[in-house]
Amino acid sequence: MKKFTKHYKLVKYSHYLAMLLVALLVFVCAPGIAKYSKEGAGTNLISVYVNGNLVGTLDDPTKVDSLVVSARKQLARENKGIILANSDVVLRGSTEIFGSVDDDETIISNIYEVFKSSAVKTKESAYEVKINTFTVNLKTAEEVVTLLETAKDMYDTEDLYDVDLITDTTRELDVLTTLFEKKEDKAEVVEEEKETLPTAGMTQKFAQFYKEANEYEEAGFTLGIKSIDFAESVEVVQAYVDSDEISTLEDAINMVTKEEEKSKVYVVEAGDTLGVIAEKNATTIANLIKMNPDRITSEKSTIRVGDEIKVTSPEPELSVIRTEEIYYEENYDAEVEYIDNDEWYTTKQVTLRQPVEGFHKVIADVKYKNDDKISTTIVYEDIVQEPIAKVVERGTKTPPTYLKPISGGRMTSSFGRRKAPKKGASTYHKGIDWAIPVGTSVCAARGGVVVKAGWGSGYGYVVYIQHEDGAVTRYGHLSKVLCKAGQSVKQGEKIALSGNTGVSTGPHLHFEILIGGGQVNPLNYMN
């Protein structure tokens, strides 16, 4: 019995010693080992899972949200675009006597790695450049400026101006627009920064006058580009776009500066022909006909000053408007002086004095759109030789309108000199011939009184109609006369049938207009 008791005491003392060592170990290693607690639900260790992955254990579940946010911030800092990362967080509690917890940095790092492996990069930060309806995206503001500078440098060959981006104060949103500044002006120390009273009213006007006068003294002209700007509205905004929507700088420059065929309206000017218009707009007459089927039907179609014609011409997406001050010398004509004659028709004019060219030296402000000249304003002129103007007397009366006396027909002989078609025929044709079948209706080209209707020797059967202004129309080689002398006829009224009588080479109508007793070219008076 004593022997048993002695052994029991030995075991008891060993148990106490073990408990003491465990307590000492817990004390030394805390808080790395969660302490057992009988309080609450009994959970003293939290396992944290993110998207099904164990990222660590902790003893305080209220810290989880802040740890997840910290991991998201780390992911965002390392990426310029917008990053989407799913965060399915699950907490599993357990009761442990002995258990370790992870430090915050370890858990944040583990969550970051989970986010990184499952993150979806949806958008990237970019600068959207909008030119009217055209849009291109670039990575940086520096690339945007380089793009705009490249477009500008094509015409600012001396690199006198900078293109800056400034906030568009007319817009509610944060939108940037362009500002051109002369480098010379930016480099100077502006005296206006000093506190001085600004000039205004007449003082300002006189100051401007003397400034301009000094600029245009004999040796003081400032030649070159005076102003420059983009023709189109340019807007720049920061946006988030898909990575494949961001262009390289090289591609953007090519898209913005490359000339493409664009449709526009051209207003016909004095001296224009279809060929001239085609040349001005780098196109062909065939293209003009194709684009204007209702207005232009052939190369011989008539165009008038002020007509609007659709054309295509090569233009870049971004055009440059600039004004250059240039010097040139040239011969020039004075404007034609006209003397109106109310007794003459507008189809008649006579030159009374021939012009003599003048000579001048000029400084002008010339406005261009890209390489196309838009306008010229003379700011200084030294006339070396005064021009003598051409003097022309011209009629003011609107000429009467003559209709073609037949429908259809093929013109076989025009007005003027010709080879006689047969023996006895004239070598100077005094009218127009149209080949038509015998019996075609012939109508009065203009209203008047029939002064002759019958046989007329070489004309065969013929009709003469006198009009109120004294002019006469003559219709020859008829097969049948349907009117009589003294009869009044209206314009377009049927007066005869065509034929092949008199000195004739075949069925046709011979038509004349006589003004002042002499034949004139009918084509100059007919609609």
Image (cartoon, grey):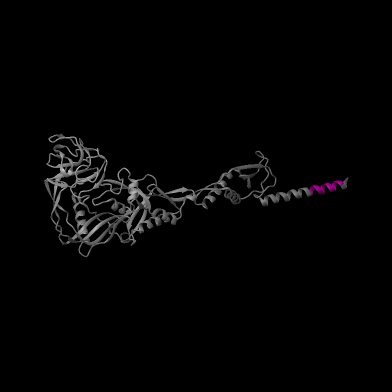
Decide which of 151, 277 is in the foreground and name it.
277
Decide which of 191, 280 is in the foreground and name it.
280
Decide which of 158, 468 is in the foreground and name it.
468
Q: How many marks?
A: 0
Instruction: Examine the rendering and report whether any part of residue 311 can be seen.
Output: no
Decide which of 78, 14 is in the foreground and name it.
78
Q: On the image, which quarter does residue 250 sit in? A: bottom left
* Quadrant position of the C terminus in the picture: top left
Task: Tell me where residue 247 appears, x and y as whole percent.
Answer: 46, 53
Direction from residue 308 to residue 466 in the image, left or right: left
Direction from residue 519 to residue 86 in the image, left or right: right
Please identify the dominant SS of the magenta region: helix
The magenta stretch spans which residues?
A: 4-13
Q: On the image, which quarter does residue 91 sit in? A: top right
Q: Is residue 493 above or below residue 177?
A: above
Can you name the residue that lies furthest to the bottom here? 219
Task: Tell me where residue 120 appears, x and y as whole percent.
Answer: 55, 47
Name which residue lies at 30% across and 44% down.
295
Task: Tell me where residue 411 appears, x and y as whole percent.
Answer: 25, 46
Name which residue lies at 76% across and 48% down.
16
Direction from residue 130 to residue 425 in the image, left or right: left
* Quadrant position of the N terminus in the picture: top right
Direction from residue 310 to residue 378 in the image, left or right: left
**Residue 91 part of the magenta segment:** no
Instruction: Examine the rendering and report whether any part of residue 447 can be seen.
Output: yes
Q: Is residue 277 above or below residue 326?
A: above
Task: Tell me where residue 322 appears, x and y as whole percent.
Answer: 30, 55
